[in-house]
Amino acid sequence: MKNTDGTGAGKRAAGESAADLVSDGDLVGLGTGSTAAHAIRRLGARVDAGLDVRGVATSYQSRDLAREAGVPLESLADVRRVDVAIDGADQVADGDLVKGGGAAHAREKVVDSAADRFVVVADDSKLADALSHPVPVEVLPDARATVREALRDAGGEPELRAAERKDGPVVTDNGNLVFDCAFGTIEDPGGLARDLSTVPGVVEHGLFVGLADEVHVGTADGGVATR
Ligand code: 5RP
């Protein structure tokens, strides 16, 4: 059953169940988005109760939330490996992901890839049989025209992501722009991921192939299934 109640109960259940996996001494990758935010708040509550962990943020948004929740932080620049990363997704199919709805996928991929255990948190509306969600592609601002052409040559339909609350494009935490690039149903996520990574001017794309260790799927009734 899809989570259609609009309460976010599935996101909350998934985020909190992942936060409950964290153990004393862990360095925790803190994902970005509304589902990962539930995990960060729960971790903060566990820190209040005596849990001894540190976090590494994947965005200014997750950094600010972690500070507010009382999760001590390390800088990503000082981190070589992560014990467990908890992060959301825009779509999940067979363990592969499209991420980057919050334009944070470049740092998310660094942190999630460095984790011994990468736990994806999502409500059941994110599950699909095959990936088909537009793929966010972060690009150097001056490369936007050449990258747009390359994305079209790769069979995509790139749309520059516009800022919601002001005129102009979304600018990432890294000072770059984002194309949301529709490819229809993605038959070969690994092949497309490799192709996108070779385009000069692409900083990072939102295909996370073969990275997730487990997926916590929350439902509207507050249940969680682990895959
Ligand atoms: C941010 C992401 C998010 O994890 C993804 O967009 C899911 O967000 P939400 O949990 O709010 O649905 O990839 O770059």
Image (cartoon, grey):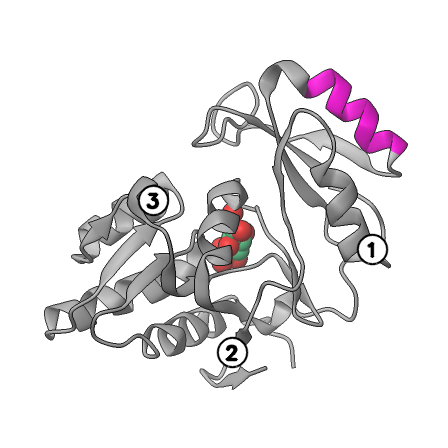
Front tag of 3 and 2: 3
Check disc 1 and give the amino acid type: Ile
Q: Residues within 10 Å of mark 1 (few under 14, many from 20)?
A: some
The residue that appears at 36% across and 56% down in the rendered structure is 30
Residue 151 colored magenta?
yes
In the image, farthest residue toward the top: 142
Front tag of 1 and 3: 3
> In 3D space, how far apart are the residues under numbered discs 1 and 2 (Cα atoms)?
28 Å
Check disc 3 and give the amino acid type: Leu
Residue 180 colored magenta?
no
Residue carrying label 2: 220
Assign a secondary structure to mark 1: loop
The residue that appears at 26% across and 77% down in the rendered structure is 23
Indicate the quadrant containing the N terminus: top left, top right, bottom left or bottom right. bottom right
Work out whether residue 51 or residue 69 is closer to the camera in this orientation and state it: 51
Disc on res. 76: 3
Disc on res. 102: none
